[in-house]
Image: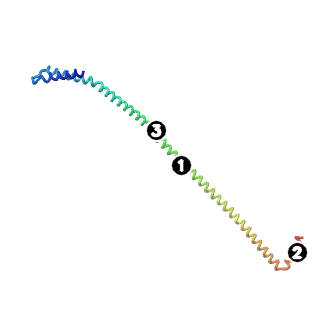
Amino acid sequence: MKNLLTLSLVLVSSNVFAAGAGGGHISDLMYPAINFFLLFGFILIKLRKPISDAFTKNSEEVENLYNMAEEKSKEAQIKLDEYTKKLEALDSETSRILQNAEEDGSKFDQAQKQETFASIERMKRDAANKIESEKNEMVKQLNSSLLDEVISKAKTEINSNKEYKTKATQKLLSDIG
């Protein structure tokens, strides 16, 4: 087939070159037109399948690219919706956390005040009890000192007066006996 085409091209083109420089007639264009149609037909027959395959391949690639882009768009939309929900939830979560923090702070403040007042009252009671205890201890010591002083003065008085001494001895003997 190749040889036939080559031969026809050589024969047709030699005729055209042999036409010379005459005035020319429309029939002179017949051989170049046949040559053109043969060449165009041959090229069309030979390149039709590769060109068709190339266009089909490009079409499939474009379709695949479009489908992939559409899929990525859907994924992006899903992520966008997800992040939008998270942001909306974040705002409500933030306000809830702040509200809880304020409530906890208020409760802590109240508990701290009550604990402080309870501690003050307990300290007042403890101080009053300690003062009372120390007062009672001092009274005891004072009474003991006073008693010791009275006994000491009584001994001195008895020892200095013979009459008291005799009475005290008799009284002791009567209590023993």
Q: What element carries label 1?
A: helix
The local crowd at label 3, few if under 14, some if 14 to 19, many if 20 or more residues have their Cα within 10 Å, is few
The residue that mark 3 highlights is 82
* Left or right: residue 34 compared with residue 164: left
Residue 54: quarter of image: top left
Q: How far apart are marks 1 and 3 (CA)?
A: 27 Å
Q: x and y percent of residue 90 in the render?
A: 48, 43
Which residue is more in the foreground, 146 or 26?
26
Residue 5: quarter of image: top left
The residue that mark 2 highlights is 170
- Which quadrant, please, contains the N terminus? top left
Which residue is more in the foreground, 80 or 41?
41
Cβ atoms at labels 2 and 1 below 8 Å apart: no
Q: From the viewer's perspective, is the residue at label 1 or at label 3 nearer? A: 3
Q: What residue type is labelled 3?
A: Glu
Q: Which mark is residue 101?
A: 1
Q: Is mark 3 on a helix, strand or loop?
A: helix
Q: In this view, does 31 lie above or below 120?
A: above
Cβ atoms at labels 3 and 2 below 8 Å apart: no
